[in-house]
Image (cartoon, rainbow, N blue to C red):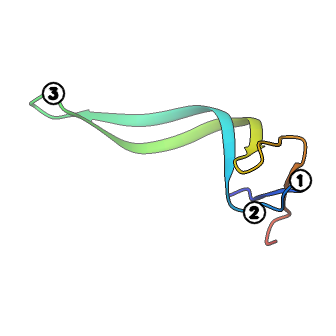
Amino acid sequence: MTRYRCNSCGNLTRFDVTATRTEKAFHHYTVGGELEVEDTETLAETIEAVVCHWCNSDAGVEELPAGA
């Protein structure tokens, strides 16, 4: 899981992330027609934008190194 930091305000916890995902999922319908989605697998993901939820900055947001 990717962590972010906003260098504009110091936020480490709240970000609005826009992503595009390609997923594979098993759709299980009951006899009554209700859908239950099981075994979802993400095949591809592209992060389009990351914006700080507190100060609305996108220019100051950076990815933190793993384990940081």
| Residue 11, horizontal then vertical, whole percent | 77, 60
The reply to whether discs 3 and 1 touch (Cβ–Cβ < 8 Å) is no
Name the residue tied to disc 1. 8
| Residue 53, horizontal then vertical, whole percent | 69, 47
Give amino acid for label 2. Answer: Leu
Cα distance in 3D space between marks 2 and 1: 11 Å
Give amino acid for label 3. Answer: Gly
Q: Which-is-in-front pick, marks 2 and 3?
A: 2
In the image, residue 28 sits, relative to residue 1, either above or below, namely above
Which class describes the residues within 10 Å of circle 3: few (<14), some (14-19), or many (20+)? few
| Residue 14, horizontal then vertical, whole percent | 67, 55
In the image, residue 3 sits, relative to residue 35, either above or below, namely below
**Residue at x 73%, y 56% (from the top left corner):** 2
Give amino acid for label 1. Answer: Ser
Q: Which mark is residue 63?
A: none
Name the residue tied to disc 3. 33
Q: Which-is-in-front pick, marks 2 and 1?
A: 1
Name the residue tied to disc 2. 12
Say whether disc 3 or disc 1 marks the residue closer to the N-terminus: 1
Cα distance in 3D space between marks 3 and 1: 50 Å
